[in-house]
Amino acid sequence: MSASVTQAQQQPQEIALNVSAILLTALAVFLTIALLTQSPADPISEPIWPLGALYTPDQLVYPTAGHISNACGYWGALSSSWMMSSLGLSSFAVIATALTVAFKIFFRKPVQAVFMRSIGACIALVALASALALLPIQTANTPLVGAGGVLGGMTSAWLLEHFNVSGAWILTLTMAVVGVLLTTDYAVLAMGRKFAQRTRASRQGMANAAKTIVLRRRNRKPFDNEAGPFGDQAASDEATAESEPESDEDSGALRIKFPGKRSSQNDDGQEATGEPLETDDDYQEHSASDEDDYAIEAGTTRDVSVEGEDVSLRQEDGHDVPEPKVRVPKRKTKQAAKEEELNNLYDEVIEEAPFGSENYHLPSLHLLNGSDEVDYEEQLTEVRRKAKVLESTFADFGFNIRVVEIETGPVIAQYEIELEAGLRLSKITGLSDDLAIALRVPSVRIVAPIPGKNTVGIEVPNEKRQAVRLRDVMEEADSASNGMNIPVFLGKDVSGNPMVVDLAKMPHLLIAGRTGTGKSVCLNAIIASILMTCRPDQVRMLMIDPKMVELSGYGKLPHLMHPVITDMRKAEAILAWAVEKMEERYSLLASVGVRHINSYNNLSRDELKRRLDIDAEADDSSIPESLPFIVIVADEMADLMMTAGKDVEQHIIRLAQKSRAVGIHLILATQKPTVDVITGLIKSNLPARLSFQVASKTDSRVVLDENGADKLLGSGDMLFLWPGTSTLIRGQGTFLSDEEIESVCDHCSVGEQHFVGELINLKVSDPEGDGSAASSSEKRPDIYESAVEVIIREGRGSCSLLQRHLGIGYGRAAKLIDYMAEDGIVGQYNGSKAREVLLSMSQWEEMQGIESDDDEEEDDEPQAIVPRRTETTHGMKPTATPTNSPAESLTPPDSAVLTVTAQDDDEVDDSDHHDAGKAGYQNSSYQNSSYPSDEEDLYEDIEYADETEYADTEEEV
C-alpha cells in the first residue's frame, strides 16, 4: 500500500481529532465564563430527573431575579448552577482537566495508562471537594452546602463523623496525594527530586556545580590514519583532565555515557529547568577543515548529576564509590529560526537541474519516522548492575579489575575496564564466553585495547534494543554531512554517535552478511540517503537486482540511467560499459587539464571552451557542462560472479582501482562472503567494508581480515572497517521501514525518466555461443518491429494485446514479449498485471535509426573470404597450387582486410551443402567452382598452398 493511500486513510481520523480538541476547548471556555458570572438568583427551572434528586437549586432559597445575569445565558446559568451546587469550587479543576486533554489531543501527545489516570483524577477530585468543604469558605456565589458542593459536603460529613477533624484532614490529604501521583504518572516525584538536586548543588557552590555540569565541544578533532577514528580521544581526555582537575573524592568515579537524550533548551543554550551551563567560546564556530573525510559526527556530551535512587557501586572493602557522573550527549543548540530552517533544509527547489527537474524537490525529513523516547533511568540501573557483575566475575577468576567508564548505545553498551599492573592482556581476551554466561547475554566482544586509550572495552548487548531511525541520524549529523558529495548515513556507533561517511571519498563499499541480519535494510538506507540529499543531476544510479524484488521499488526514480537490471548477462555488459565510461571521463579530464570530477564541475562553460580550444561561436553541445556521479549498486555479488566470474572480477577491479577521480562508485552486497566471491584482488581494492553477522570466523576473516563478525547479534548489528585503517567500528545500522521507502520513492518519482540510450542498446552476449557480442536483433522475426510499435503505442506489455492486434497465437506472442524484455523495451514479469513499457516511441525510432546505420556500414565494407580450417570441412581438403610466397597466396588482391568468422557446426553444414562452390570446397577441387560474374574477379587470383604451408601461414595471419 502506497504512502498516499495511507495518508488518505489517516486524514479523516486527523480531522476528527482536531475537531474534538477544538470542541473540548470551546466547552471549557464556555463553562469557565459561566462559572465566573454565576449568580444564585438567576431564574432557572427545576432540574429534571435524575438531577433533581442530587441537589436543590440555590435559586429556590435565594430571592429570584427578574432576568438571567449570566454572561452565557440560560444554558450557562443552568450548567454553572449545577456544577457549583454539585462540585463547588472544585468545578474549576474539572475545567482544567478538560483543557489538558484538549491540549494533548491537538498536539498529539500520547497518554498512557488512561484507566489508571482516570481513577487518579476522580480520587483527586473527591479529595479537593472534601478539603474545600472542611475549610470555612463562604462567599456570595458559593453554594449553601459549602465550597465543596454536594460531593464535598457529603464526603466531609462522613469523615467528620467517623474520624473527627484531624483524621478527616489526614485522609483527605492522603487521597489527594494518591490521586495526583496516579494522574501525573509520578511526574511530581521526579520534579521534587530535580528540585532537591538543584538545591543541593546550589549549597555546594558554583565551583562544584561547574564540575558536575560541563558542556563539551560539539565536534572532535579529525583523526589520522595512524590513530584511527578515535585516535584523538586520549588527547581530548588529557585536555579535559587539565581543565578539570580531579579531587581525591572524585578520582576513580564511574562515568556512564548515554546516547542523545532529548532535553528542552532555550535560546541561550541552557536547559529549560534553569540549570547553569558553561559553554566554550568557540562552541558555535565550525570549520570545514575540522572535518575528516570519514569522520563520525561525535555526540556532544555534558555531565549531569544522576537522577533517580542512590544506587552507587560498592567496592569490596565496603566503602562507597563516589557519586558517578552520567555523560549525556547534548542536543544541538539552535535558534528557533535555525530549527525551522533545518526542518525545511531538504525542501529547497532545484535550480538549473537537467532531466526536466526544474520543479524537483528533495524529499523532506517529515517523510521519515522518528525514534521513540528512551527510559534512561531504567537503562542506568541496568548498566550499573552489569558493571557489578563484570567486576565480580573477574574477581572469581582472580583478577582485580575495575570498570571506569560505560558508553551506552542503542543496542550495545561498552564497559571500559582498567587492568591491574602485571596482568597480561591475553588472559582477558579469552574470557568472552565466560562473561557472556555470567551476564546472561548471547555474546560478548572484547576490544583490546580501545584505540587511543589504556583501557580494554567489553561490549555487552542491552536488554532493550533501540531502533536507529534514518531521520534521527540525519538530524544529528547535519553539520558533518555538509560539504560531502554523496553522504551516506550508516547508523550509530556504540556511543550513540551518528556514523556518516562520504561515498565519493571512500570510494567504494563492500557489504556482507548472512540472510536476515540487516544487509538489505542497510542497502535501502544507503539508497535513501542518496535520494534525500542528492538531485538527479548530481548522482545517477545503476541498480543490479538478481532477486528481482529487493530493488524493484526504485524502478521509477529519475536518478536511474537504466531500468533495474535483473539479467546477469546484461549486468556484466553494463559493468563493461562503466569501465569504458571511466576511460572516456579520464580522457575528458585530461583534455581539460583537471584531475578530479569536482574540479571539472566547478569550471564554467566559457572556461571549458577555452581549455578545449573551441571557438566561442562553435557548437559546444557535445561538451558536458557537468559530470554527475555514477553509483552502481549490486544487491547480490555472488550471482554476478557465477554468471561471468572472470569478466566481472576484471571489471570490478578496474573500476575499484581507477574510478574514484571520475566519480564512479561501487556498492556491492553479498550474503555469501567466500573466497570465490570476494577474491583477494577485489578485497584489496575495496578498503571500506561493512559486515553484519556471518556464519563462521572464516567468513569474518574474508570480509574484515579478522574475527568478530561471527559474534554479532544480527538485526542491524554491524562492524565497519574504516578506509585506510585496520580499525573496526561497531554500530547499529539505520532502520528504514517499507512505508518510509515508498514515501521517499513516491516523492522522488516525478516527471519522465531519462535513461541512457547507450545502455538501453547494449547487446548481451550469448552464453551458448562463442562469447562474442553478436547482435540479438538478427534473431528477431519480421513481425517483431510491428509488435514493438503496438506495445509502445498502447503503453503496456501484454500477450493478449499482441494476439488481438497481430492475429497470432499465444506462444508466438509470449516469445515476442520475451524478446522485448531482453532488449529492455518492457519490464520483467509482473504477475497478472501487464508488463511496464520502458521506452517511448521516439526512443524506439532512435534505436531503429542506430541499427540501420550500423547495417549500412557493415554492407559497405568489402568482405574477403579466406580458406576455412581443415577441421571444419568434414574431410574435404582444397587442392594445393604451388606458389612462390605462401603469404601472398592467402591475400586477395582487391581486399584490404581479412576476416575469419567462427560459426557453429550447424551453420557450417548448411553453408557447405547449400553453396559448396561459393565456399571453395566443391568435390575437393577449385577448378570446377562456378562463382557469380560480379565476384569472379575477386577470387580468380586466389591461390592455395599445400596443407603444411597453409597451417604455417595461418599463424602469421
Image (cartoon, rainbow, N blue to C red):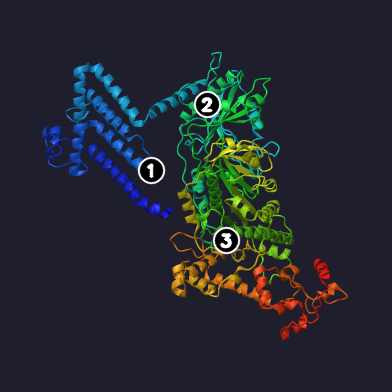
> Where in the figure is residue 166, as x and y percent of width and height?
25, 16
Q: From the viewer's perspective, is residue 590 above or below residue 289?
A: below
Q: How far apart, in angstroms, are the residues tagged by discs 2 and 3?
A: 51 Å
Residue 209 appears in the rendering: no
Residue type of the residue flagged with mark 2: Leu
> Where in the figure is residue 145, as x and y percent of width and height?
17, 28
Where is mark 1, residue-wise? 107
**Circle 3 residues within 10 Å: few <14, some 14–19, many ≥20:** many
Taking the view exactly as shown, the residue that stands out farthest to the bottom is 933
Residue type of the residue flagged with mark 1: Phe
Q: Earlier in the sequence, mark 1 or mark 2?
A: 1
Q: How far apart, in angstroms, are the residues tagged by discs 3 and 1?
A: 44 Å
Q: How far apart, in angstroms, are the residues tagged by discs 1 and 2?
A: 42 Å
Residue at x-position 69% and y-position 63%: 608
Q: Which circle marks residue 562 in the picture?
A: 3
> Where in the figure is residue 826, as x and y percent of width and height?
52, 65
Residue 310 appears in the rendering: yes
Question: Is the Cβ of the residue at disc 1 closer than 8 Å to that at disc 2?
Answer: no
Comparing marks 1 and 2, which lies closer to the viewer? 2
Residue at x-position 21% and y-position 20%: 159
Question: Is the Cβ of the residue at disc 2 closer than 8 Å to that at disc 3?
Answer: no
Pick the residue in front: 228 or 58: 228
Where is mark 2, residue-wise? 439
Pick the residue in front: 694 or 662: 694
Q: Secondary structure at mark 3?
A: loop
